[in-house]
Image (cartoon, rainbow, N blue to C red):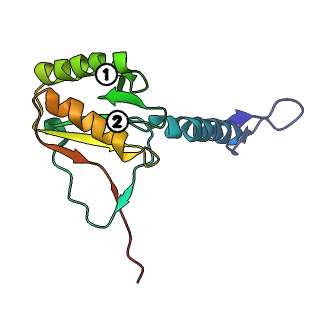
Amino acid sequence: MGMQVGEGSGDVMGDINVTPFVDVCLVLLIIFMVITPMLQEGVAVEIPRAKSVQDKPDEESILQIVLDRNLTVYVRNTPIGNLKSRATEDDLRRRISRYFKDSPAELVQIKADKNQRYGQVKQIMRLIQETGMKETTLVADEVEEPQ
């Protein structure tokens, strides 16, 4: 509430000034609009589409390995190397096996960019099998059937 000052009757003004409230709300709206796209988890990869997709198991028992467009390999959102050089392949094998020793997972998911060739995805699968993990799955989006 405010008071009228000056030559008046000295009555209290009954209007509420909402301008500061609207200003704060607009600033909060802008902040949320800017921050929301940054909250996406994981490495951004365009995954391929498939007609038959199984439900995902619980996240604790999964070790997710991502292969992005630039052939960079990520384990649990941490870049561990690149497939472009042969010397890096041995390093990748060591790092992947270290992840399995630190936190053994029941299932390994490979999330590869849809523009990657099958040979590069197969190379990652081979590296995983050489570390002792036998079961791997590929991540894909489900294709929506036209009605």
Inspect the image, locate mark 2, and give the three-letter code of the amino acid beneath it. Val
Percent x, y of residue 46: 45, 47
**Left or right: where 10 falls relative to 38:** right
Quadrant the N terminus occupies? top right
How dense is the environment of label 1, judged by Cα within 10 Å: few (below 14), some, or many (20 and up)?
some
Instruction: Report which residue position mark 2 lands on.
Output: 66
Label 2 secondary element: strand
Residue that appears at 48% across and 37% down:
69
Report how many numbered discs are placed on residues in the image.
2
**Left or right: where 107 falls relative to 18:** left
Q: Nearer the viewer, residue 127 or 44?
A: 127
Q: Nearer the viewer, residue 37 or 126?
A: 126
Percent x, y of residue 137: 21, 47
Residue 99, located in which quarter of the rendered image?
top left
Q: Is residue 52 above or below residue 23?
A: below
Residue that appears at 28% across and 41% down:
122
Inspect the image, locate mark 1, and give the three-letter code of the amino acid beneath it. Glu
Residue that appears at 32% across and 41% down:
121
Q: Nearer the viewer, residue 28 or 68?
A: 68
Q: Nearer the viewer, residue 50 or 90?
A: 90
Instruction: Report which residue position mark 1 lands on.
Output: 89
Percent x, y of residue 71: 43, 32
Percent x, y of residue 129: 15, 33
Label 1 secondary element: helix
Q: Residue furthest bottom?
A: 147
**Left or right: where 143 falls relative to 130:** right
